[in-house]
Amino acid sequence: MTVVELVIASGKGGVGKSTISGSLAVLLAKKGLKLVAADADAEEPNLHIVLGIDRWDRVEEYYEGRIAYILQDKCTKCNICAEECPFGAVEVIDGNYKINEYICEGCLTCSLACPVKAIRYKFKVVAGHIMLAEKTRYGFPLISGESVPGRPNSGKLVTEIKNRAKALLGTEGVLLLDAAAGIGCQVISSLTGAQFALLVVEPTRASLSDLKRIHKLTKHFMIAPMIVINKFDINPEMVNDIEEYAKEENIPIIGKIPFDESVPKSINMRRPVVEAFPDSSASQELRRIADFVAEKVLSDWRSWYSRYRPKKPEPYIPVIVRPQKG
Ligand code: SF4
Ligand code: SF4
């Protein structure tokens, strides 16, 4: 086995992704698989909470990019930088031109445009932190990250988290990534290079529409998807719609987790549900899913991959949201 990347993803938050990631990591590690878990949601990391980690073995600063600033004694207040900045990062405060460092992307446009060369850059900006628990109480390492609020490019931090996790694994093992919700740059970083994505969906119209969006993204990256329906019993009619979509798109549904009060209780206890309430109905289904992943997907991952990977990549059109000027 080489390093196999399994990304747990969902089109939107709040569908139980981290709960499923934590329990799957515990169950797969118990089977003797060499595994590293990574929290790839650098804006709202919470896998460490699910796994009950309250002390990190290592915390490192993560540096990245550059931020522009204006030399006030050189600035002639011509307003060109404010007009040219594509991100609206130049502000006028008390008559002086200033750059909002939480918005600046370090793109160089303003310094190239400034007629008097009044703009300089700070480098090695602290953009976040990378945290490592060398051995969780469940035996495998967890690597996580947290971006500094307001700093852009958390996708790059996720890539760094992934690289560190792969370095921990070495030449073989399973990298289980709990991705951020949605289809933004952090999720793109999580999916890049992965073989498998476990897509978590709830039986609601909105969740099915989110599933379609994230599935489209996995198709772009030529990833073999699989679906887990969480709280499947709250809306059986929508389960039919999800099943229909899965059938049309050749996506295996590998589990249906029932609504279970044990899940929120286990989160409050900061323990994976499969450890806190092993006999609960959710835990029973999670064990079945873990068995399936270990025996059907990972044991001969190349044949599973060739069976379920997309036939051709889906074109990807990014949506860029920029702050309004003025
Ligand atoms: S133009 Fe680019 S470098 Fe200059 S302030 Fe705007 S974002 Fe920052
Ligand atoms: S372009 Fe240069 S001189 Fe003009 S306002 Fe900006 S920093 Fe000042």
Image (cartoon, helix red, strand yellow):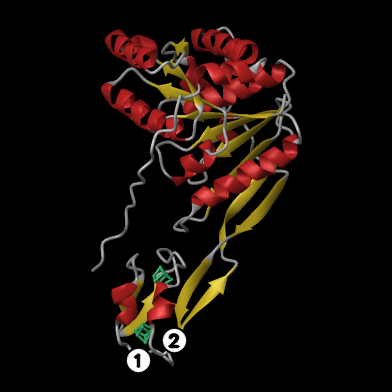
Placement of the N terminus among the 4 image quadrants: top right
Please tell me in which quarter of the rendered image ligand 2 is found.
bottom left
CB within 8 Å, label 2 to label 1: yes
Q: Nearer the viewer, residue 208 or 107?
A: 107
Report the residue at 75% width, 18% height from top: 32
Query: How far across and down, in percent of the image, does residue 75 sit?
Result: 39, 89
Rendering quarter of residue 124: bottom right
Q: Residues within 10 Å of mark 2 (few under 14, many from 20)?
A: some
Asked if residue 316 shows in the view, the reply is yes
Q: How many circles with numbers are drawn on the protein?
A: 2
- Looking at the rendered structure, the secondary structure element under dot 2 is loop
Query: How far across and down, in percent of the image, does residue 286 sit?
Result: 54, 13
Residue 20 falls left or right of residue 33: left
Query: How far across and down, in percent of the image, does residue 40 sit?
Result: 54, 40
Q: Nearer the viewer, residue 306 or 269?
A: 306
Report the residue at 49% width, 54% height from top: 153
Mark 2 and ligand 2: say if the CB distance to the nearest ligand atom is below 8 Å.
yes
Mark 1 and ligand 2: say if the CB distance to the nearest ligand atom is below 8 Å.
yes
- Mark toward the start of the polypeptide (2 vs 1): 1
Placement of the C terminus among the 4 image quadrants: bottom left
Instruction: Residue 76: give its label.
Output: 1
Q: Circle 2 sits on which residue?
A: 118
Q: Residues within 10 Å of mark 1 (few under 14, many from 20)?
A: few
- Looking at the rendered structure, the secondary structure element under dot 1 is loop
Report the residue at 73% width, 44% height from top: 57
